[in-house]
Amino acid sequence: METRPGTPRIDDEVANELRAALGSANVCTSADDLDRYSRCTIPWQSLCAAVVFPASAEDVAAVVRIAARHRIPVWPSSTGRNWGYGTTLAIDDGAIVMILERMNRILEVNEELAYAVIEPGVTYTQLNAHLRSKGHKLWIDCTDGSGQGSVIGNALERGIGETPYGDHFGNLCGLEVILADGERVQLGSTTQGLKTWHTHKWGVGPYVEGLFTQSNLGIVTQAGIWLMPQPESHNSFVFEVSDERHLPKVVDAFRRLALTAIVNTKLHMINDFVSMAILTQRISEQVAQHGPLTDADLAALRRKYCIVPWSCAGGIYGTRGQVKLQRSLLREALSPYGRLIFISDALLPYLQRLIDWSWKSPLVRRLIELGARTSLPMLDSAPYVHKILQGIPTEYFVKHAYYRYRRPRPQEGVQPARDRCGLIWFAPILPFSNTHIWPFLDACKLRFAAHGFDFYVAMLLMNPRSIICLMAIIYDREDADETAHSVQLYEELLAIMRERQFQQYRAGLQSWGELFKDAPEMQRLNAKIKAALDPDNILAPGRYGVDL
Ligand code: ADP
């Protein structure tokens, strides 16, 4: 690939220093490499000047020192799968992007105290495979994003997963960081080798771990992650709400269930379009290839795939007795409002066999679809839902990013940024109350329609009192008009959110500049902390609005 005009370059002197520190193979400056790490699914473009791959905390410190000497910003990522929020992009051209994927050692697994100590390059797939292959009776919590995502990277974004361990930062304990001056610190620890470093999250003295999440104050080079002891019994459940008039009652029921810890997972409530985007692509359906689905199209697709307006999914864990009791409590609370289906490990092999037969024989398929009141593609997704609730990652759900993609989506190796899919996440968090949720969703839905987009919303239970109303703007990147509308829609959604006094739980790069616009004192506080820790503004300047 030719170097494109205007491609930022680092001086030979800097490149040589980086190569001397990391080895030539771990410093990339070719146009191809720069392009690969400057791809994202959001409508934002910046081009980095170098990509570096340190293998140790010492390497990380060396890069930071070189960058500081030459005043070049460094943008660290663990595995760089942060699609929809910015991936590995820096705000401006010319940064050194640091990818920590070579730091992928699992340093310790403590079975008794149920935690692991890992480096930032450790992925969900890797940690899950390691625990299972070594026979540890411990489960990870993963997201429904890529299994190639970093356990630490997601936790530093304060991302959430699925199980009772789904608050990823909440379960991170004992961080090692490299500061902007290259110093290495074990946060919260008064002595090297502290025995409670990975068991007591608050340490002693000022609690500072949080400063290194959704920020730009240091580079995390290892951390402890708490794991779930494999329960005696686990069921996943799917709850289908066909009549939307029941939704306020469903929200009330789930809030009560969560407040009383009968539901203690990161419950997902998704609308019909989320299911459609997972199951199919616009090019595969007889629907208009521009603009949103019409009401008639939506109704036809709902019928074709047996998709109900809202589906909820979660897990229950415990002894056999506990799971049995939880099943009956869920049934009692939810049955008046929809169809509740439980899946257990015992049922899974039968279900899988039915699915396999159905794909082979149209007659079996028809019988099963009628009997189960579902469609085969919907049935097909059930084992993935069940497994993800056991910490087994899958690429299955990431396929939604390809809904408006003009070519068939890949069956494996799904990588929306590489493939130039258009996807923007908008992730406001609201009180888990009908008073707030439905008027907000109605207002947002109108804006989606006005800009020609299908309304995608997944409500994810952050805790019993707050719910994330995660929306995706899925757009065709090859269509300039659609891309322009995606930008306008995103801005309007931010405005609606602010007007109603809500904020995001996690923010995309395009919104960082405005994040603290209505809170100048907060902006100043962040700047003071940044000035103390990174006076030369070397680490990801401007990330989450934190800048000098
Ligand atoms: P994932 O691949 O799991 O989505 P990323 O590696 O893309 O996670 O990380 C998400 C974001 O978190 C990155 O853009 C980066 O800003 C921040 N981040 C990730 N890993 C680190 C780290 N080790 N130290 C500091 N910040 C990090």
Image (cartoon, grey):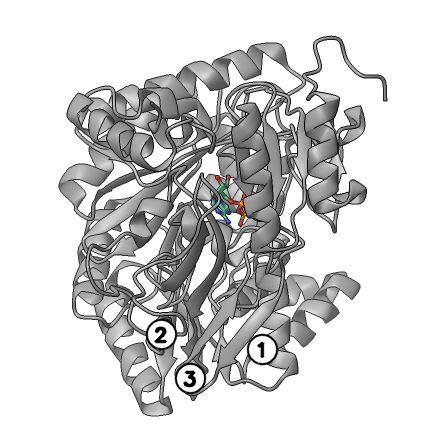
Q: Which mark is residue 231?
A: 3
452 or 4, which is in the foreground? 4
User: Where is residue 234 drawn, in percent x and y?
Assistant: 43, 80
160 or 184, which is in the foreground? 184
The quadrant the C terminus occupies is top left
- Give, as a three-letter code, the residue at label 1: Leu
Name the residue located 67 percent from the left edge and 18 percent from the top edge. 478
- Label 3 vs label 1, nearer the camera: 1
User: Where is residue 63 drawn, in percent x and y?
Assistant: 60, 40
Query: Based on the displayed image, in which of its 4 quarters is residue 35 positioned?
Result: top right
Report the Cα–Cα distance between label 2 and label 1: 24 Å
Label 2, on which residue?
Answer: 194
27 or 435, which is in the foreground? 27
In the rendered structure, the answer to whether residue 51 lies left or right of residue 441 reads: right
Q: Earlier in the sequence, mark 3 or mark 1?
A: 1
- Give, as a three-letter code, the residue at label 3: Pro
Report the Cα–Cα distance between label 3 and label 1: 15 Å
Report the Cα–Cα distance between label 3 and label 2: 29 Å
94 or 67, which is in the foreground? 67
Looking at mark 1, is its residue's CB closer than 8 Å to ligand 1?
Answer: no
Name the residue located 67 percent from the left edge and 24 percent from the top edge. 49
Circle 3: element type: loop
Query: Based on the displayed image, in which of its 4 quarters is residue 519 positioned?
Result: top left
Name the residue located 51 percent from the left edge and 47 percent from the top edge. 275
Label 1, on which residue?
Answer: 131
Q: Earlier in the sequence, mark 3 or mark 2?
A: 2
Count of marks overlaid on the render: 3
